[in-house]
Amino acid sequence: MGSDPIFQMSALTIGYALLFYAAAGILVLGVLARIWRYARTPQPLKIPVPPAPTTRGGVVLRMFAEVTLFRSLYRSNKWIWLFGWTFHVALALVLARHLRYFTEPVWTWVALIQPFGKYAGFAMLVGLAGLWARRVLVDRVRYISSPSDHLMLALLAAIAVSGLAMKYLAHTDIVSLKAFFLGLMRFDWQPLPADPVLLIHLALVAALMIVFPISKLLHAPGVFFSPSLNQVDDAREHRHAAGWSARLVPPGAAEGR
Amino acid sequence: MAAAFETPPLGEYPVIPLVHEGTMAHSKPFVAKPEHQKGVGFPGELVPDWEKVAVAKLGELVSESRALRVFLDSCVKCGACTDKCHYYLGTADPKNMPVARQDLLRSVYRRYYTLPGKLFPKLVGARDMTKDVLDEWYSYFHQCSQCRRCSVFCPYGIDTAEVSMAARDIMDAVGLGQKYSNEIIGKVHKIGNNLGLPEPALRDTLEGLEEDVKEETGVDVRFPLDEKGAEVLLITPSADFFAEPHIDGLIGYAKVFHAAGISWTLSSHASEAANFSLFIGNHDNLYKVAARIREAALELGVRRIVVGECGHAWRVAYSFWNTLIGPFDFLDPRYPAPQHICELTWDLIQRGALELDKSANDDKVVTFHDSCNVARASRMGAVPGGQFTIPRNVIRACVNKFVDMPAETIGATTFCCGGGGGLLTDDLVELRVKGALPRMQALQTVVDEQGVNYLAAICAICKSQFTKVLPYYKHPMDMIGSVHGLVSKAIVLGPKP
Ligand code: HEM
Ligand code: HEM
Ligand code: SF4
Ligand code: SF4
């Protein structure tokens, strides 16, 4: 690395380094804390909603279809499904593609998907734009939107725009950037390139990481804990009891049932 | 009380109305009086510091229910559920959109139990617990029939029914209860059924039925009460004892038992299948009402428990009894415990144990209304979807002409009758009529196209609700009937040897 700008860049580097440690800490601990809470909160009654499978395996399939295909949403509203699914698949591709900044050597599958990832940034924007348009244009969706719902879309769109800007307009020094992040992970700090677009991209990403565990983005872990989706429809065959329902002692039941 | 209102017009096809704020803001059921509240263990009137009590109760409920916690956190406001509620479709009031209904409670949850809500309430739509909020809860959480239709369409299965049950539980905890539900639950605790029908009156009614059936068929079909050692304990909604068209259903069950030679009994101790505690989301009452059934089954020494035609009762029986009052290790393991009357009848039909003459119902073109609690909160038979096929199989075995309403209005996506969830009261007639719109729209289609003249259902609430609202939509009120009313007509009883 160059030697002269190191002092200048230090403040910036240190600032971003600390920001990302903090953001990563909040994201990981925050989401783990939520998951812990969801897992620890009892579900006293059986409330699966149809089409409810009668076996564990069936539930795994159902959940898989919900998470990968958004099956209920598809049945519900084709436009939301189209935009929402496009957005999420594109997001997944973009994130997978980004793994190249954090792995050395880059994993083979990450290298393989790079070409597809190129277009994913645009697809993500299209999806977000469609969702946002609905939020503004459809009176029912407008009614249920609060400022935070718009801000969340704005945040993601801004991340995507700044990312695409780097890719197509204001290229950044990817090699140094990667050195910076690998450095963070190895506690051996390296300078961060001071390109404005990159700094914006990274600041927004840090913001996303910080709000994740305290916002509606909790839907990502939440969906797996939703009792209406993850319960097996076997109430008559297996006696379910948790929380208050585990403390009941019905009349005539043997002690310590 | 109920202001004059207009029955919504049926169009040529269903439409999603534009948002029209406040159209149902005036709708409120009668408030429970102190004596109704006492009967179910709630404070008689608004407690001092009720805001704090409400917020604390909310926290308690969230910590006791994973469903509530996940549902309150996870909604992304995607809008997929906004056009799925019959009350929104019938009233255009945006607070009847499922997500907006949830938000009435979620806004308070966010304010007191989430960081962004504590710091930036405006930004995330968080609200303080105020009297206005409480009043709004009272109005709109009593415009939800807890039918779970929204849940089927939500990508996370968010069930507004759970949210409105929680809200009603909180309101009860601060002393603001709904008269209709709480008075009825009190009657069950005190007398044993929703109607407050005491044992002698019940015995009388059943004897009267025996005479009626004897007169009609010449056969001694029995309606036993409190008979120890019977094989089956029948738990049925008390409306079956005297209301039309419910009573035809009860006669149908009795004929089925008679024809199959199954000994059975009703119980005066548990002379009610309904458990309105479900509607008010209160688990102490839910358990207490359910416990009578276990007591009765043990006391009478029966080997099977069969549940009559009642939607939410079947939900409680199928989904919750094993949890609340199980295990049923004292019952005959060869039969599901509990068993639905349609399961029992269909099983007998398949085994050739019943002789059915379909032509007895040739005056009817029948369609079937899937009741929401049966469709979306329970099952019948051994395979998923049995709750849709088994009642239809029973009907098809009893009639020649059966047609279904449009696919998106039946099965798992069935529309509520508009009167479920503790709303079946005259102080909510406007809501009930408007909420029935989507079902009436679907019914009109098959009336016009296939000449349907009989709407069969397996829920006491649906039957009463349709009896009330069908005339508003220019149909005769006796168009609604019990599935076992059809069985009753078709079944051929040999004179008892
Ligand atoms: C298990 C993983 C996930 C699943 C199953 C999932 C599923 C969904 C579904 C079904 C919707 C509703 C439809 C839509 O508007 O797209 C949604 C909305 C949304 N998701 Fe996800 N998601 C996941 C992860 C994420 C992640 C990691 C993010 C962001 C970092 C995210 C951001 C969003 C946003 C912002 C919305 C709201 C869009 C709007 O405003 O209309 N999701 N998600
Ligand atoms: C610390 C985390 C991140 C770093 C270091 C980072 C860095 C970058 C860089 C350097 C580029 C330019 C790629 C190029 O020129 O080929 C880029 C592009 C992009 N970034 Fe990020 N980014 C991060 C997180 C995210 C997140 C969380 C999102 C989405 C929510 C995102 C969305 C995008 C998009 C859509 C593009 C453009 C398309 C593409 O190249 O894949 N980035 N990012
Ligand atoms: S549970 Fe039924 S009545 Fe309640 S909001 Fe959902 S669709 Fe409407
Ligand atoms: S469908 Fe589910 S996630 Fe979407 S707005 Fe309705 S409740 Fe929220």
Image: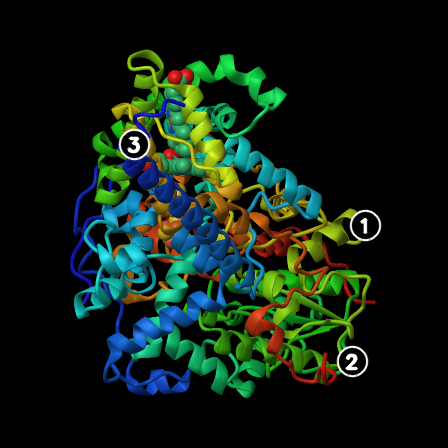
| Element marked by disc 2 | loop
Q: Which residue is mark 2?
A: B229
Q: What x and y, as percent, mark residue B152?
A: 48, 44
Towards the viewer: B324 or B371? B324
Q: Which residue is mark 3?
A: A9
- Which label's residue is closer to the chain start, 2 or 1? 2
**Residues at marks 3 and 1, CA–CA distance in whole angstroms:** 84 Å
Residue B301: image quadrant is bottom right
Q: Is mark 3 within 8 Å of ligand 2?
A: no
Towards the viewer: B289 or B153? B153
The residue furthest front is A3
Q: From the image, which quarter does the N terminus of chain A lie in?
A: top left
**Which chain is disc 2 placed on?**
B
- In the displayed structure, B268 sits above or below B58; it is below
Q: Which residue is mark 1?
A: B351
Amino acid of disc 3:
Met
Q: From the image, which quarter does the C terminus of chain A lie in?
A: bottom right
Badge 3 crowding class, 10 Å Cα cut-off, few under 14, some 14 to 19, many 20 or more, is some
Q: What x and y, as percent, mark residue B109?
A: 32, 61
Disc 3 or disc 2, which is closer to the eye?
A: 3
Residue depicted at x 31% and y 78% = B53
**Residues at marks 2 and 1, CA–CA distance in whole angstroms:** 25 Å
Disc 3 or disc 1, which is closer to the eye?
A: 3
**Which chain is disc 3 placed on?**
A
Residue depicted at x 19% and y 49% = B6
Amino acid of disc 1:
Arg
Residue depicted at x 66% and y 81% = B296
**Residues at marks 3 and 2, CA–CA distance in whole angstroms:** 89 Å
